[in-house]
Amino acid sequence: MDWIAITSAIFLGAMMVFIFPRMRAAVKNSPKGNMQDWMGYIIPLAAVVAFIILLINMV
Amino acid sequence: MNDHNISISRSEESILATNKVLKNTYLLLSMVLIFSGIVAAVGMSMNLGHGAALVSSIVAIALMWFVLPRTANSSAGIPVLFAITGLFGLGLGPILNHYMAINPGIVSTALGGTGVIFLGLSGYALTTRKDFSFMGGFLMVGMLVVIGASLLNIFLQMPVLSLVSSAAVIMLMSGFILYETSSMIHNGETNYIMAAASLFLSILNLFQALLHILGAFGGDD
C-alpha cells in the first residue's frame, strides 16, 4: 500500500469523524417528509438517472 | 388593515432578501467555477501527480471546514472561497489528464452532463419552490455511508463498489443541489458565500462521479 492510499484512508477516516456529529444533529433536527415530499425528490432523480443512461450510451 | 400592510411589507422584504441571496450566490458560483476551471487547466498542463492532487484537495477541505465558516460573514470569505475552489481545481488536473488519455469525449460529456443536471435541478427547485429541508438527515447519513464505503474500498479494491459509490454520490449530490437551492428560497441559508461553496462542492462531486461512471463504460477500468 503506497503513501497515497494511506493518506486517503486517514483523510476519509477524519472526514467520517468530522461529519458524524453533524449527521446526528441533521437527523435529529430535520423535519420528517411525507410521501408527497419524497416524490418531489424521486421524480427529478429518476430524470437524472435516465439522462445519465443516455450519456453512457453516447460515450 | 395595518397588520395586513405590515404582513405584505415583510413578505416583500423576504422575497427581496431571497432574490438577493440567489443572485449573489449564482454570480459568485459562476465566477468560482470559471476560476476553478482555469486552475484545473493549469494543473493539467503542469502534469501534476496524484499525490499533489490529494494534498491540494486535503488543504481545500481543511480550509472549507476550519477557515471558511469563520470568514464567510465578512468580505474575507470571498478570497478564501477562491483559494478553496482553486485548490480543488488543481486537484482535478491529474484526474482530467487520466480521462483525456483514455477518451477526451468522456471529459466533455461529463462536463456538459454536470451542467445540464445542475441547471435542471436548480430550475426544478426554483420553479416548484418545494421545501427540501426534510432531506437533511437522509443526505448526511448517505454521505457518511459513501465515505465509509470509499474508505473500505481502499483496502478491498473492488471496482463494483467504486462504481456503486459513484452512483450513490450522483444521487446524493442531486439531493444536495435541491436541498441547498430550497434552503436559499426558504431563508434557511442567507449567506451567499456558504451557499456558493456548498453548491460548488456538489457540482464538483457530481462531475467527478459522472467522470468515473462514463469512464467505466467508455473504456476505463
Image (cartoon, coloured by chain):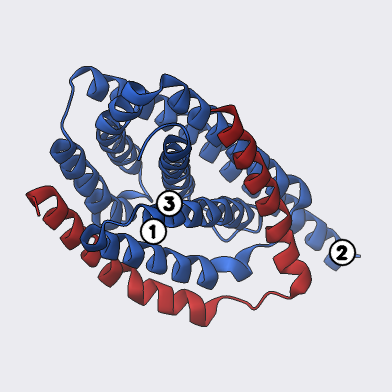
Identified by mark 1, the residue type is: Leu
Residue at the disc numbered 2: B4
Q: Secondary structure at mark 2?
A: helix
Rendered residue at 44%/42% (across/down)? B200
Q: Camera-side residue: B35 or B117? A: B117
Rendered residue at 53%/70% (across/down)? B138
Q: Is residue B23 left or right of residue B65?
A: right
Residue at the disc numbered 3: B163
Chain that bears disc 2: B
Q: Position of residue B113 (x, y in %)?
A: 56, 33
Q: Which mark is residue B6?
A: none
Counting residues from the start of the chain, the first of labels 1 and 2 encountered is: 2
Of the two numbered discs 2 and 3 in the rendering, the one whose residue sits closer to the viewer: 3
Residue at the disc numbered 1: B161
Q: Secondary structure at mark 3?
A: helix
Mark 1 vs mark 2, CA separation in Å: 57 Å
Pointers 3 and 1 in contact (CB under 8 A)?
yes
Mark 3 vs mark 1, CA separation in Å: 5 Å
Q: Is A7 placed above or below A37 here? A: above
Q: Camera-side residue: B158 or A49? A: B158
Q: Position of residue B132 (x, y in %)?
A: 65, 62
Q: Is residue B23 left or right of residue B146?
A: right
Q: Quick one: which chain is red?
A: A
The quarter of the image holding the N terminus of chain B is bottom right
Q: Position of residue B91 (x, y in %)?
A: 25, 36
Q: Camera-side residue: B142 or B187? A: B142
Q: Quick one: which chain is blue?
A: B
Of the two numbered discs 1 and 2 in the rendering, the one whose residue sits closer to the viewer: 1
Chain that bears disc 1: B
Q: Is residue B41 left or right of residue B22?
A: left
